[in-house]
Amino acid sequence: MRAAMDARGPLCVGVDPHASLLASWGLADDIQGLERFTYTVVEALAGTVAVFKPQAAFFERFGSRGVAVLERATADLRAAGGLVVMDAKRGDIGSTMAAYAEAFLRKDAPLFSDALTVSPYLGYGSLEPAVDLARSTGTGLFVLALTSNPEGAEVQRAVRTEDGRTIGATMLNHLAEENAGADPMGSFGAVVGATLGDLSAFDLDINGPLLAPGIGAQGATPADLPRVFGDAVRNVVPNVSRGVLKAGPDAAALRSAAERYANEIREAVGG
């Protein structure tokens, strides 16, 4: 991921074919519209953008045919040199967590991805099967820590009575332990919203990537990144979805929007 962002620019494009976006492209909210949207994004951006984050739910809502579109898109993005972070936010315990991990991180799985978003709110230890599989397959995880939705603070900023840490800070601490000694950074990242403002109360230096949603339609800008992430900004993976996708369906316009965001982010983070 570090090499990909250095070569292609520090940008993750979300692939989010929700109904309103399909409509803005003049497409129907059906499997044909999903296919047209998804394959246009892949063809336009797969060879130039470093990281892609498909939102699995927008494909799953079409059933098996939608999942088939996601399978093909994931394979095509990776074949063109893009890294795929599957945004499925899986979280469970024991063999169920292991099965979720296998669906996305086992190398012969139809949806094999470079990383998976996971929820630790059944306890960080519940993620152990996914952590183990990621280590064995050379893939990664992005753990929900400080998310951009306002409701997230209800849990993530709650104080633990045992040691005084908030829940979000506890998750960051676990990830720092997972990544200890890795160079240039570890494979276990956190999801930290770019819209959250001053996060100086949290230690974001987890020696791993920080997936940062919220740029564009949610109100954050590339210029906000140094203020939000401080010294950890070098490892931020800024995610832009609608800010890029609304430029479609023209492929050249999609590429131009992605390039513009990548350049703005590179300038903002100083590299």
Image: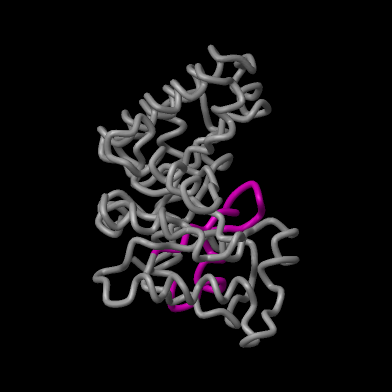
Is 208 magenta? The answer is no
Please give the name of the residue rendered at 26% of the width and 69% of the height, measured from the top-left corner. 184
Nearer the observer, 251 or 194: 194
Residue 53's place in the image compared with 230, above or below, is above
Is 226 magenta? The answer is yes
Quadrant occupied by the C terminus: bottom left
Place of residue 233 in the rendered image (x, y in percent of width and height, measured from the top left):
44, 70
Tell me how many marks there are: 0
Place of residue 173 in the rendered image (x, y in percent of width and height, measured from the top left):
48, 77
Relative placement, left or right, of 160 versus 221 is right
Nearer the observer, 106 or 3: 106
Residue 218's place in the image compared with 88, above or below, is below
Please give the name of the residue rendered at 46% of the width and 73% of the height, measured from the top-left corner. 174
Place of residue 252 in the rendered image (x, y in percent of width and height, measured from the top left):
41, 29
Query: Magenta part of the protein: which range?
Result: 209-232
Place of residue 148 in the rendered image (x, y in percent of width and height, measured from the top left):
64, 58
Nearer the observer, 200 or 107: 107
